Image (spheres, rainbow, N blue to C red):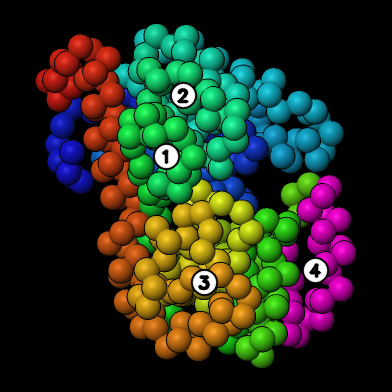
Amino acid sequence: MMRGENQTALRIAQAAPLWASVPPADYGGTELRVSWLTEELIRRGHQVTLFASGDSKTRARLSSVYPRNLLEAMQGGSTLNYTHYASASLAEALRGGENFDLLHCHTDLEHIAFAILASIPVIYSLRTALSIDDQWLIERYPEIEFVAMSRSQISQVPPRRRPSIPVIHNGCDFDHYDLSTEPGRYLAFLGRMGPHKNPLGAIQIARSVDMPIVLAGQPQDRSERAYFDAEIRPLIDGERVRYIGPVDQARKRTFLREAAALLFPIEWEEPFGIVMIEAMASGTPVIAYRRGSVPEVVDPGITGFYGESVEELAGMVPAALELDRRRVREHARRRFSHGRMVDEYVELYRKTIQGARGGLDVAAVE
């Protein structure tokens, strides 16, 4: 379906993780993507019920089994086990299955049994890097419609299963971000303060080019807090290395817009870093390690650069600062708008529903 095309409205259930609200107050890439998807579906006239934490904000019908996101609830001691609540949320979605044409799950694969037993078509978005156990599940249940966010994410799935998994790159609502045509005065790092995100590497790059760096984000668990205290905190001096902690959506827009470049020196096969396209939406180029989905997202010499080491990335900073920031934004918008993402999901929804109905034309179903 082309964007804006008038076809029969679909009744869609979106099942989000409960770790963060939709959209998230600060960190939460999956929850942000679910929000953009849900709100655009509503704008196009589809009927959407969002199964998410009770503090979510949406124009969809919100169904929640708990009034707060579970990360805050666990930190406050009012909950202890995530799986209890996540399972209950998905159970509620399936209990109301007669009200939906399709259920789109954005939850962990440990809940795959729900899809197996569902009375309605289910699409399962793969939301993180795949473990060997995840790959086993994907291969065991070929009847489930999985969708990946990058080719990198499914690169280790057995070749006989891989072609059946469509890839829909994440999108970004570019209208929520402001373009700055002039390079900022600092390099930016935004993400979890753990070794796999590698804020230490970002600091080393900034030091190599004698530029200040501002770090945003926070440790998310005990091991990340230990890493932050041992490796990052001693380097924070408030001038050349500044730390501003977690940022909400408004502060994040300003933070990215005023940066000279976003550093993304990840040390793992990240399936898709939404922060890369958020930076591009601000006109800010991305300098990243060639890991995970980075080569699928960053177009060298247009929206940024990628390489293999601190030294190589440091050498790319001067060229990145010379990039046309207006072109960075417009090129990224063509590839990664949330409208394009929703086009592709709606096409997949209709194809999946049609297959479940034995080939009946969905557009003709009232």
Q: Dot 4 surroundings within 10 Å: few (below 14), some, or many (20 or more)? A: many
Numbered disc 2: secondary structure: helix
Q: Quadrant of the N terminus?
A: top left
Q: To which residue does mark 2 refer?
A: 139
Mark nearer the N terminus (2 vs 4): 2
Q: Dot 1 surroundings within 10 Å: few (below 14), some, or many (20 or more)? A: many
Mark nearer the N terminus (3 vs 4): 4
User: Farthest front residue?
Assistant: 159
Residue at 37% in and 68% down:
299
**Label 3 – label 1 distance at C-alpha:** 24 Å
Q: Amino acid at mark 3?
A: Gly
Q: Amino acid at mark 2?
A: Glu
Numbered disc 4: secondary structure: helix
**Label 4 – label 1 distance at C-alpha:** 33 Å
Q: Find out whether the residues at labels 2 and 1 contact each other: C-beta distance under 8 Å.
A: no
- Magenta span of residues: 222-246
Q: To which residue does mark 3 refer?
A: 307
Residue at 52% in and 71% down:
307
Q: Is residue 226 above or below residue 305?
A: above
